[in-house]
Image: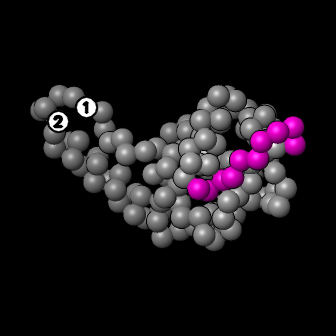
Amino acid sequence: MSVLLDLGIRLLVLAAARAPDKVTIRETAASCAASHAHLAKAANRLVKGGFLCSLRGRRGGLKLALPPEAIDLGAVVQSLLGSQPACHVRDEVLVGWRRVQDEAASAYVRHLAKMTLSDIL
């Protein structure tokens, strides 16, 4: 699991636990002992993906944009990790290995697509 994915899931779980109140990147970073910059990147991707909504200003923060049962974990993974291949091998000798890893990554996302945020709360 990537750091970005781990932080994004933590952020969603914390936002669900605090609903209807907001969470902030600062307090989440402190509770996870995580980098503010990494958490901000995860939050940005989750907002762009439609899973969180961002409220600006002094009393701003992040809230779930959807109910937990409507947040597809497979879509969350794709939003956080993008469409990058699972393997970054450039050696043409390992094309078969790259294909196997890509197939495994696709199976992982398909499995998670059957689950929602409410399944892990």
Q: Position of residue 55 (x, y in %)?
A: 76, 47
Question: Badge 2: how crowded within 10 Å, few (<14), some, or many (20+)?
Answer: few
Residue at figure coordinates x 74%, y 54% from the top left? 63
Q: How is the image coloured?
A: one colour
- Looking at the image, residue 88 sits to the left or right of residue 8; the answer is left
In the image, residue 119 above or below residue 74: below
Q: Is residue 40 above or below residue 49?
A: above
- Dominant secondary structure, magenta: loop
Q: Are marks 1 and 2 in contact (CB under 8 Å)?
A: yes
Measuring 48% from the left and 70% from the top, which residue is drawn there? Answer: 114
Viewed as shown, does residue 27 lie left or right of 5?
right
Which residues are drawn in magenta?
Answer: 50-59
Is 117 within the magenta?
no
**Location of residue 61 in the rendering, given as x and y in whole percent from the top left corner:** 78, 45
Q: Element under label 2? A: helix
Quarter of the figure with residue 71: bottom right
Indicate the amino acid at tag 2. Answer: Leu
Which residue is at a point 42% across and 58% down the rendered structure image? 109
Name the amino acid type tagged 1: Val
Please name the residue that numbered disc 1 is placed on.
Answer: 89
The CA distance from mark 1 to mark 2 is: 7 Å
Q: Percent x, y for residue 40?
A: 65, 35
Q: Position of residue 85 (x, y in %)?
A: 32, 42
Disc 1, SS: loop
**Quadrant assignment for the C terminus:** bottom right
Towards the viewer: 80 or 62? 62
Q: For residue 55: magenta? A: yes
Which image quarter: residue 56?
top right
Residue on which disc 2 sits:
94
